[in-house]
């Protein structure tokens, strides 16, 4: 069952093989490194179904003012407040 996110939910985004060519990523899935960052759900993305807009936390720890990225729901995990 897919989790229903709502604006303001705190999340951790985990991406694998970012920037790798698709053919290479399929052949060697363990070769890529995972990138992890924290953020806050802004709302559903208009790009694709089941994608969410996530505001990335700033390096100083504040949640406001960070860049917003469209992220597939499969790369989003909940985090505690």
Image: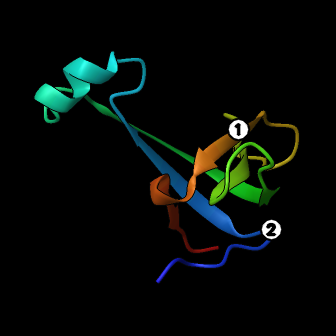
Left/right of residue 7 with respect to residue 10 in the rendered view? right
For disc 2, the neighbor class at 10 Å (few under 14, some 14 to 19, many from 20) is few
Residue 38 screen position, x and y as percent: 58, 50
- The residue that disc 2 covers is 8
For the point 82% across and 68% down, the residue is 7
> Against 47, is 80 above or below?
below
Left/right of residue 51 with respect to residue 35 in the rendered view? right
Query: Helix, strand or loop at disc 2?
Result: loop
Residue 54 screen position, x and y as percent: 71, 49
For the point 70% across and 44% down, the residue is 57
Left/right of residue 6 with respect to residue 25 in the rendered view? right
For the point 67% across and 56% down, the residue is 49
Between 52 and 54, the residue placed more toward the observer is 52
Residues at marks 2 and 1, CA–CA distance in whole angstroms: 15 Å
Tell me the number on the disc at residue 69.
Answer: 1
Between 67 and 4, the residue placed more toward the observer is 4
Left/right of residue 26 with respect to residue 21 in the rendered view? left
Between 12 and 21, the residue placed more toward the observer is 21
- N-terminal of the pair, mark 2 or mark 1, is 2
Query: Helix, strand or loop at disc 1?
Result: strand
The quarter of the picture where residue 5 lies is: bottom right
Tell which residue pokes out farthest to the right in this image.
65
| Residue 28 in view of the camera | no
């Amino acid at each position: 069952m897919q989790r229903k996110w709502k604006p303001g939910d705190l999340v951790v985004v985990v991406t694998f093989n970012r920037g790798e060519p698709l053919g290479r990523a399929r052949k060697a899935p363990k070769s890529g490194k995972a990138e992890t960052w924290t953020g806050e759900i802004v709302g559903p993305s208009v790009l694709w179904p089941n994608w969410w807009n996530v505001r990335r936390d700033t390096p100083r720890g504040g949640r406001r003012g960070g860049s917003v990225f469209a992220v597939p729901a499969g790369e989003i995990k909940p985090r505690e407040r």
